[in-house]
Image (cartoon, rainbow, N blue to C red):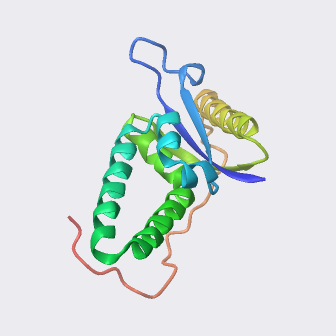
Amino acid sequence: MSLFAIYAKAAAADQPQTLAHEDVEVIRDRFSILACLLTPIWCIWHRLWLELVAYLGVAFVLGFLAFFVGEGAASWIGFLVAVLIGLEASAIRGYALTRKGYQFKGELISPNPRDAEWRYTAGQLNAQQTLRDRAEKPVQASSPGPSFSTTLLSNERPTGAVQ
């Protein structure tokens, strides 16, 4: 079982705003060996152009740094940067999707990406059906509704000004 991040982009303005027209991306949260060892190829594969430019800038700075602190120290720093990129590969892809207009919808635990997308879609359909049922159900004045307590959970008084 793996943890998956779900990102969704609403349908275009000329299409109906339904779940069928929503673009969903599923990203597995894990260490990426390809991102660690072959970062430029990984960036090109996932179309992460801004991240590729940032990586090339870091590589240039590390090459410049090697001249002053020595090649051994610069290679260790480069190794640590590569491991960091491998660890944060899924987050980097998520940030790129948010820049492209996607919204983070949540995380799911699932055995594979296809099942994670199916679970997300089923949850959205259940939520839409619940809203429809609530809208269609008439409100009955004779039946008591859910009771909510208005007592404070602690003895502390709220501080600060309400704006």
x 79%, y 53%: residue? 1
Q: Is residue 65 above or below residue 5?
A: below
Task: Out of 31 and 15, give the one closest to the viewer.
Answer: 31
Q: Is residue 54 above or below residue 21?
A: below
x 60%, y 60%: residue? 147
Task: Out of 69 and 38, give the one closest to the viewer.
Answer: 69
Q: Is residue 145 visible?
A: no
Task: Out of 109 and 91, give the one closest to the viewer.
Answer: 91
At which x and y percent is residue 53? 33, 44
Task: Out of 16 and 61, give the one closest to the viewer.
Answer: 61
At which x and y percent is residue 21? 55, 19
Q: Is residue 89 left or right of residue 53?
A: right
**Residue at the outermost bottom position:** 155
Q: How many marks?
A: 0
**Residue at the outermost top position:** 14
x 62%, y 27%: residue? 136
At which x and y percent is residue 76? 47, 72
At which x and y percent is residue 43? 47, 41
Q: Quadrant of the C terminus?
A: bottom left
Residue 123, picture quadrant = top right
x 72%, y 39%: residue? 119
Q: Is residue 132 visible?
A: yes
